[in-house]
Each structure stands twice: as structure tokens, then as C-alpha cells.
Amino acid sequence: MTNEELGKQIHQKTQLLNTVLDNTKNAFELMRHSAKDILDYMHKEYPKEFVFTNKNEREFEIRFGSDILIFIMHTNVFEFSRYHEVMKTPYVTQDKERSFCGMINIYNFLTDSFDYDRDFDLGYLIGRVFINKENHYFIEGKREVGMLYSNFNTAIINEDSVESIIKSSMEYANNFDLLTPPFDEVKAITVGEIKSTVASRNNITAKRLGFEFQQDKE
């Protein structure tokens, strides 16, 4: 390969990655504004139950009821393994560059975990939004949040789609209830643990801690 050919190849790849990242940033801003509009509307009626917080250019959170959803945009562009289902779709096989995607992660935590500084509590990744060079997107996630890979060729990220993503995520989190851990796993505790902050470490709280959650298999 000549210097000219190598330089051209690197330039084309850089342009592709920059386009994907710009699209992902724009999608994240749409999400941020849509989330704020949704929460501001609900905050008027229920001021203590709905709060939007802008963290930085790559992160924002929404609080509602006993839940927090944290949206985080990754700064890198990813390609899928050749074994991934999306790689088998006609949309991607016709143009391999369509498989390069930016990523936005959606995490669900309990509000009390943050309010009471329970640093060892667990949260769940409930969805990953992938956006490509053509502003097409799909979501890997729980049944209520995710969408079929076969829609990748038609699904465009826009104001309507991000509003749907946010509301679906909120609905999923609201219906994803906190269950008690099995009794035998928590019945014993030492005097030292109950007196010290170690107790909080050993009493980790999560919505499905200690349970086999059927939807996690799907």
C-alpha cells in the first residue's frame, strides 16, 4: 500500500467516525431536551416526584417516584462483532459502514441509593441506543425498551423517537419493582457490621438482588 492510499484510507475512516459521533451527539441533545420537557411538565403537577438534572455534556438524569434513570453518551464509536444479529441484516450487509455506531447507555437506579449514599447498591443497564452515519438507530434492551434489529433500516432518530425511548424507559423502570432478597442470604449479621458503615456494604440493595429475573434471559 502506498503512502497516498494509506492516507486516503485513514482519512475516510476518520470522516466516518466523526459523522457517527456528530449524529450521536445530536441524538443525545434531542434526548436531553425531550427528557427535560417531559419532566418539567410532570413537575408542575407533582413537584416532589419529577426532577430533571443536567450533569454535563455527556450525562443527564431524571428522577421520578423511587427511580432514577441516568443517560450517558459514550465518546467512542463502535462496530459490532460479525456474529451479532445486526450484522446479518440486509441493511448492514449492503454497506458495512452502517454498522459503525455511537452509543447511549440508559441505567436504572433507586433514588434512595443516591439520597442515602449507598455506594454499594446496584443499578441496571436497561437499554443501549445505537446511532449510525445515516441517523438510523436501534436499541438493545429489555422488552419494553428495546426494538428489533430488522427495524434498523427504517428507524430514524428524531424528536418523536427519543420521546418514545424516554417514556418507555420510565415505564419500564416504574414497573420494575423492588423485591426482598431471600431470607437465608440476609438473616445473619455481626455486631461489628451493624455498628459500622460496613453494614451498608453487606446490605446491598437492588431491584432484583438475589433473584433470578426472567427478563434478564431475554
Image (cartoon, rainbow, N blue to C red):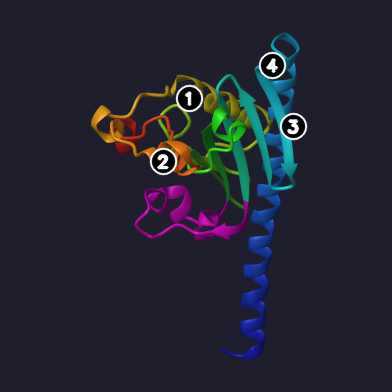
Location of residue 83 in the rendering, given as x and y in whole percent from the top left corner: 34, 57
- Quadrant housing the C terminus: top left
SS type, badge 1: helix
- The reply to whether the magenta stretch includes residue 212 is no
- Which of marks 3 and 2 precedes in the sequence? 3
Name the amino acid type tagged 3: His
Magenta-drawn segment: 74-102
- Which of marks 3 and 1 precedes in the sequence? 3
In space, the residues marked 3 and 4 are separated at their CA atoms by 20 Å
Please indicate, yes or no, whether residue 174 appears anywhere in the rendered image: yes
Q: Residue at x 56, y 28 (%)?
A: 112
Please indicate, yes or no, whether residue 124 appears anywhere in the rendered image: no
Q: Pointers 1 and 2 in contact (CB under 8 A)?
A: no
Name the amino acid type tagged 1: Tyr
Q: Residues within 10 Å of mark 4 (few under 14, many from 20)?
A: few
Q: Which mark is residue 193?
A: 2
Q: Closer to the camera: disc 3 or disc 4? A: 4
Q: Closer to the camera: disc 2 or disc 3? A: 2
Within the image, what quadrant is residue 11 found in?
bottom right
Which residue bears the numbered disc 4?
A: 48
Location of residue 154 in the rendering, given as x and y in whole percent from the top left corner: 54, 37
In space, the residues marked 2 and 3 are separated at their CA atoms by 44 Å
Which of the two residues, 131 or 180, is positioned nearer the viewer here?
180
Name the amino acid type tagged 2: Glu
- Which of marks 2 and 4 precedes in the sequence? 4
Which of the two residues, 94 or 133, is positioned nearer the viewer here?
133
